[in-house]
Amino acid sequence: MDGLTQIIRVTGREYYKHIVSMVMISLIMVTVLSPSFFLIKLPFSLVYVMIVMGPLLVGAAWAVQQLLLDRSTSVIKSFFQGVKKYFLPSIGYSLFLSFFVLIIAASWWHYNQVGGTFAFALACFQTYFCGMVFLSQIYTVPLLVKFEYSLKDSIFTSVKLLVKNPLYTILSFFQILSVFALLILTVVGLFIIFPALATLFNNIVTSTVIATEENIDSWETANI
């Protein structure tokens, strides 16, 4: 399995190679999300984000994949082709993630209402549990878009890959989190760089893990 340093190098090289298209992907995502910041009031803005997040992630993953394959299609066209192609699975993925977001929100709302040590401990535990669920889904979108798994298989395979590669997955997560922390200081960089960069990094990390799993399976089969 390639080290994260090598993956970061590859990610940087591919991002620079397609920098204009990558920035365009980020701008599409930010533009679609912008009503939740400026036009829609809470809690409806949260509902809006939870609904559109799945299609946005899938559209970005599809557009990035076409760039990596050096397809000459317009990046805007590729983005919305991906949304259209995987619309139902992406909505299902949004609902899946939203369920756990609601668990966290309900837990802390309950603690705010009743207080007490037990309610606080329960909210912390459920937040930790849901955080692990989100971490376990780091590979789902590339599995769905790049490797053409069904949504159900993508979700469960992503969990299996986390179980098989816990340290690698956690380090990958913290690597992209550190990039987020750096770009949040620039504000503008966060919006025009991070969405596409995170999508590209996730694509390459998933490909590396899948390639390693296939090599292990091939070796085991040859030695049976």
Image (tube, helix red, strand yellow):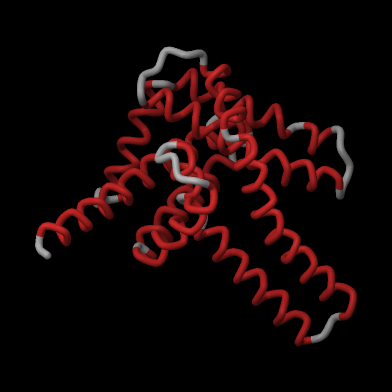
- The residue located at (54%, 37%) in the rendering is 194
Q: Nearer the viewer, residue 141 or 22?
A: 141
- The residue located at (68%, 61%) in the rendering is 100
The residue at the far front in this view is: 224
The residue at the far bottom in this view is: 117
> Taking 59 as reference, is 212 above or below it?
below
Expressed as whole percent of the image width and height from the top left, the position of residue 87 reads 63, 35
- The residue located at (16%, 59%) in the rendering is 221
> Taking 8 as reference, is 13 above or below it?
above
Q: Count how many numbered circles sit on residues in the image.
A: 0
For this view, does 93 lie left or right of residue 109? left
Expressed as whole percent of the image width and height from the top left, the position of residue 161 reads 39, 59
Expressed as whole percent of the image width and height from the top left, the position of residue 41 reads 89, 42
> Taking 88 as reference, is 66 above or below it?
above
For this view, does 196 lie left or right of residue 107? left
For this view, does 59 lie left or right of residue 94? left
For this view, does 183 lie left or right of residue 65? right
> Taking 163 as reference, is 114 above or below it?
below
Expressed as whole percent of the image width and height from the top left, the position of residue 82 reads 55, 28
- The residue located at (46%, 54%) in the rendering is 173
Q: Quadrant of residue 68?
A: top left
The quarter of the rendered structure image containing the C terminus is bottom left
